[in-house]
Image (tube, rainbow, N blue to C red):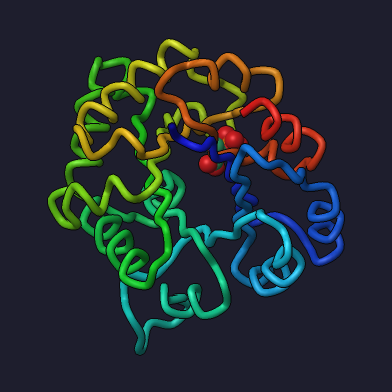
Amino acid sequence: MRRPLVAGNWKMHGSRESIAALLAGLPKLGGVEVVVCPPYVYLPEVIAALHDTDIGVGAQNVSEQQQGAYTGEVSADMLRDIGCRYAIVGHSERRTLYGENDEQVAAKFMAAQAEGLVPILCVGETLAQREQGETLTVINSQLDAVIQAAGIKAVCSAVIAYEPVWAIGTGKTATAEQAQEVHQAIRQQLGANGEGTRVLYGGSVKAANAAELFAQPDIDGALVGGASLNSAEFGEICKLA
Ligand code: PEP
């Protein structure tokens, strides 16, 4: 039995004022694990505000380096030190806008786990790749890069997020069948150790499409971008999980 997880990726949005309002509206639910991933600078105050709730806090990124002369970077050790539980790695915006390749994603994954953070490992195909019929090959190879580096057990103890690049921030969602096909393939790749691994769907998830996605047998929750900035909408998605 996998406990559903809904994680909100706030990306580079918010201010102290808007975040205080967002925090006040977050759902308090027992059955579903809820996680929010604010911008780095707001992590300490979000962690403090949520410390006596079950809502977890994650970072949107993490350095693959432990410490040293890496201007602008934040290490896994620092994130653990301030009370983060999760770190998103391999988000498509990091892969495409900041050139993170599979090798770097694997290094970040291992750096996060080495400090006891749970990586939320994102994988996903572009529209061109889907149209060429390469979806499952692309997902398989993004996941395999991390399995080869970190080992299958390490990957199974993380959270995986299937996020078709063409569905992120575009308002286009994969159909429940399209998503289920990929989630099932991910679970098969994880093998016997992956039965308990949570595989989230991400890509324009809203209250209006969440129920159908969550009804699929291999979809264990969602990584939510835009809709997580509206606490009523996000709360609704969490309830549906
Ligand atoms: C994301 O950034 O991970 C995401 C899924 O964004 P959105 O929900 O806005 O498509």
Percent of width and height locating residue 100: 32, 55
**Residue that lies at the very extreme toward the bottom in this rendered image:** 68
Q: Which of 109 and 129 is in front in this view?
A: 109
Report the side of 193 relative to 209 (left or right).
left
Q: Is residue 211 above or below residue 237?
A: above
Q: Is residue 238 above or below residue 219?
A: below
The structure residue drawn at horizontal position 80% and vertical position 52%, both measured from the top left corner, is 22
Report the side of 111 relative to 79 (left or right).
left
The structure residue drawn at horizontal position 22% and vertical position 26%, both measured from the top left corner, is 188
Q: Is residue 73 above or below residue 101?
A: below
Locate the N terminus by quadrant: top left
**Residue that lies at the very extreme toward the left in this rendered image:** 148
Percent of width and height locating residue 80: 48, 74
Percent of width and height locating residue 165: 43, 33
The structure residue drawn at horizontal position 84% and vertical position 61%, both measured from the top left corner, is 20
Residue 225 placement: quadrant: top right
The structure residue drawn at horizontal position 35% and vertical position 85%, both measured from the top left corner, is 67
Residue 14 placement: quadrant: bottom right
Percent of width and height locating residue 203: 53, 30
Locate the C terminus by quadrant: top right
Ligand 1, by image quadrant, is: top right
Q: How many marks?
A: 0
